[in-house]
């Protein structure tokens, strides 16, 4: 896969500085949150540039994820990368079981009703307290709960289509 077609997945964001030895607070988008630490190399995407870094150590401290990166050894160095997105190549993610999907793989899929009505394309997926939601842009924005079986009837990643039991009149 060429660099231009490489699919990147955002695993989290550097959210702050932790301590005086260059440790970073990490807001993880992975489930469980500590899974972000299973990747020993991250690409930090910040201010239009990518920087590959090695993760020396990481901890889950009472639900907060903190990480130590090689070469980031003081609070000033750590502060300089606060706000960076943590991304990895899609192919580095582990394979999933039947009926499981990475959110990144759902982005760009066309969403159709069981009756064949096109509802739009998935811009992104977001978590709520109850369910993950497919977000389809428009006026107004359409939110469809990702509830396999009950609402989401079929996902065909090869065809890039998601079939849902959802009325075109529903806006959430």
Image: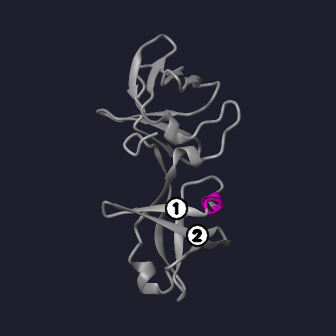
Residue at left offset 40%, top offset 46%: 3
Q: Nearer the viewer, residue 112 or 151?
A: 112
Q: Nearer the viewer, residue 62 or 22?
A: 22
For disc 1, the marked residue is 42
SS state under label 1: strand
Q: Is residue 68 left or right of residue 110?
A: right
Considering the whole magenta stretch, tell me its main secondary structure: helix
Q: Is residue 137 left or right of residue 33?
A: left
In contact (CB < 8 Å): disc 2 and disc 1: yes
What's the magenta region? 34-39
Residue at left offset 48%, top offset 17%: 113
Residue 162, x across and y down, in percent:
51, 24
Query: Would you say residue 135 sits in the magenta stretch?
Result: no
- Figure check: 146 above or below 94: above
Q: Is residue 125 left or right of residue 119?
A: right
Q: Quadrant of residue 116?
A: top left
């Amino acid at each position: 896969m060429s660099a231009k077609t490489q699919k990147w997945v955002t695993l989290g964001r550097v959210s702050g500085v932790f301590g005086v030895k260059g440790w970073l607070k990490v807001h993880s988008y992975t489930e469980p949150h500590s899974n972000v630490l299973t990747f020993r190399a991250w690409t930090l995407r910040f201010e239009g540039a990518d920087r590959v870094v090695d993760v020396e150590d990481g901890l889950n401290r009472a639900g907060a994820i903190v990480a130590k990166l090689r070469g980031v050894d003081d609070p000033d160095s750590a502060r300089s990368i606060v706000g960076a997105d943590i991304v990895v190549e899609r192919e580095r993610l582990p394979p999933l079981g039947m009926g499981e999907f990475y959110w990144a793989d759902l982005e760009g899929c066309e969403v159709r009703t069981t009756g064949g009505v096109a509802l739009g394309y998935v811009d992104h997926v977001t978590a709520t307290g109850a369910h993950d939601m497919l977000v389809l842009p428009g006026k107004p924005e359409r939110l469809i709960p990702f509830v396999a079986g009950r609402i989401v009837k079929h996902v065909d990643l090869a065809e890039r289509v998601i079939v849902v039991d959802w009325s075109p009149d529903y806006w959430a």
